[in-house]
Amino acid sequence: MRQIIVFFTLFVLTFVKIAPATSNGGFFSASEEAIHQNRLNLTYVVNEAEHTVTVFTRIQYVGGADQFVWLFPVPNEPIVQFRSFTLRPPIDLEFLTPPNYCNHLYEVNENYGSGGPERDQPQPDNYTLIPGDDVIRWMQDNHYSIPNGVETVLDDYAAQGMSFVAFELAQNPEATSGYIGEVMITYHADTVIVPLRLTAFSSGILPEDIDTFYPVESRLPIEITILGNARYIPINMEQAIVDFTHIRSIHAVGNIANPSLSQITQSYNIQRSLALRQLNGNAFVTEFALRRSSLKHPYITQLYGEIPHDEMTLDPAFAPDPSAPDVSNVIDLNNYVEPMEFWGCSTRSLRYNDGVYAQAIPYVDVAPHLPSGRTRVADLWLAHPSGWMLSELTINERTVYVLAPEVVDETIFDDLPTMPMLIVFMVGFIEWSDPPRVPFLNILEQSSPARAVQPFYYPHNGNRATLAILTTPEDFETNQAMYEAMTAYPLTFQYHLHPTLRHTVFFDGMAFAYPEGWIESVNDAGNLFIMPLGSTGQNAPMLHIYPTTDIFEYTETSSREEKIVGFSEQLEATYNIDQQVAYSTITSYTGCEEITWLFFHANGRMGFLRASFSNLIEISAPEEVYAEYEDLFELMIQVDQLVFVC
């Protein structure tokens, strides 16, 4: 049986033999200059009728070696072409995401760009075909390094009758990374084998401070696309399965000012890597396997692996399996992840994210170090020692809040203060492009008194705050844990809406506080439920938000008055609420006047409800246990009225 054997490695000009290493392998440099392969993209076209394979190569690397050689083993004399190409159809992974119920959180879409390191694209334009039993002599004659252990591997390939295509390359002396220009090689073979054993060898030292566009990894990412007549599967390595239940968007609350367009792909990449690492890298993920009748070779398989350099002891092999099922490139995440969890719509999921959220802010439990005092400033709860007083100052036409042991005025900053204080500077909606700093407090830039300066954004009302502790170095050293907890407390978003209600959920432009031990979920109809963990259905106390259309049908052409009247009538029928009272309450809300919660006792439950523009919000419990939750419900209602934004 003929074999498709593709091997990618670089030998870099040197006169010193260097021992094999287990970092990024296959590249060998002169002197101290390093060059390392750090990504491999291969596309094969298998022509079963003609018993040929055409391989298209793309190799990324990092390092600054000026000259190197790329050796490519082939089983027989090849046809080599140097040109750019577009081979595979534009098929990519697609993710169908759950509905986003907290997309009204304000996000700052600021993109910061910077120049990358100097990159190069050395383009092969000539080659030498070297017999396998002559490759070592050829390397010696041309002064290429032969690391310890490489001869054994080269001899093994030579014993299989392999020859080597040698591409001698040079890159810009200023470059520190790049990729080798496209090469297309055709030869006779039937089976796909990718020998990687030589890529475990490398030479030279990569400086720790080298500025690289492509990071050097201890595992080599390998993407393989095979076009043939059937799906291809690995035959000497495992097939890894990605756990889609752990894929998340970037956490909406924890990253309100750091949106990313690629967060879902990033989360998928993390889970893909975890699946491969559980098998120690000796596996491939089949990302998709699809039949495309429009192609000359109608089946396309894409596989991905991350091989540790110290595990490159065998050559991955792939064979067609006509009985293997298709693998769609469309991943419907609705089948795997609950919407509120996926988007990170609650502060609870930020606390218990278990590392599954892409770029989620680190959660720190500051509660053990927080002082007992609480003050609400500009829709933000702040912690401070008991007895501290709030002062509202105007400096440089900006409002600045100061919490300190006594009331202060603007003159407090004429000299270097010695009294400890928590300073809060708010930035409103129109100023979000400004640097998040306290512009007037140049004393904060002095090294001695300024400590724990924390700029951050917080959700729902579009504010940004900068918090700073200003005190003496001696006092800061004594109370450092407390002061750092005071500035970090708002960043955790725990007790965000109230000091005794730990969590907050953001849903359809609204925010609701709820206690520790409760959990949120959304059903297929878009109903939000928040109830004690382990509770189910109508037997549980809950906060329930559901579309008004669930109890009253109306059309797009219905007038506002028709909607209010019909909704009021239905509230009376469903909840035993007087129609006139319901009408007045809904009118006040839709007119942005006030929030009024209405008490009800119906259908075996007791509680309160109110309307929003498109939802009905119910906080209730079974009538037999209502008394246990009455105080909690009243507190949740008070918080809702306090934070109401029309």
Image (cartoon, grey):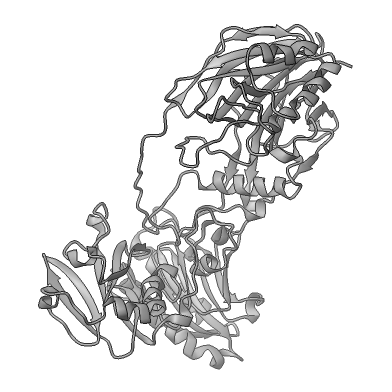
In screen coordinates, is 638 left or right of 182? Answer: left
Residue 489 occupies which quadrant of the picture?
A: bottom left
Q: Nearer the viewer, residue 262 or 72?
A: 72
The location of residue 242, given as percent across then percent down, is 70, 47
Residue at 32% across / 65% down in the picture?
Answer: 461
Residue at 47% across / 35% down in the picture?
Answer: 213
Above-or-below relation of 26 to 501: above
Q: Nearer the viewer, residue 378 or 542?
A: 378
The location of residue 284, given as percent across then percent down, is 74, 38
Pick the quarter of the image with the C terminus.
Answer: bottom left
Above-or-below relation of 327 to 477: above
Above-or-below relation of 126 to 373: above
Residue 592 occupies which quadrant of the picture?
A: bottom left
The location of residue 536, given as percent across then percent down, is 66, 75
Q: Nearer the viewer, residue 12 or 59?
A: 12
In screen coordinates, is 493 left or right of 468? Answer: right
Residue 635 occupies which quadrant of the picture?
A: bottom left
Pick the quarter of the image with the N terminus.
Answer: top right
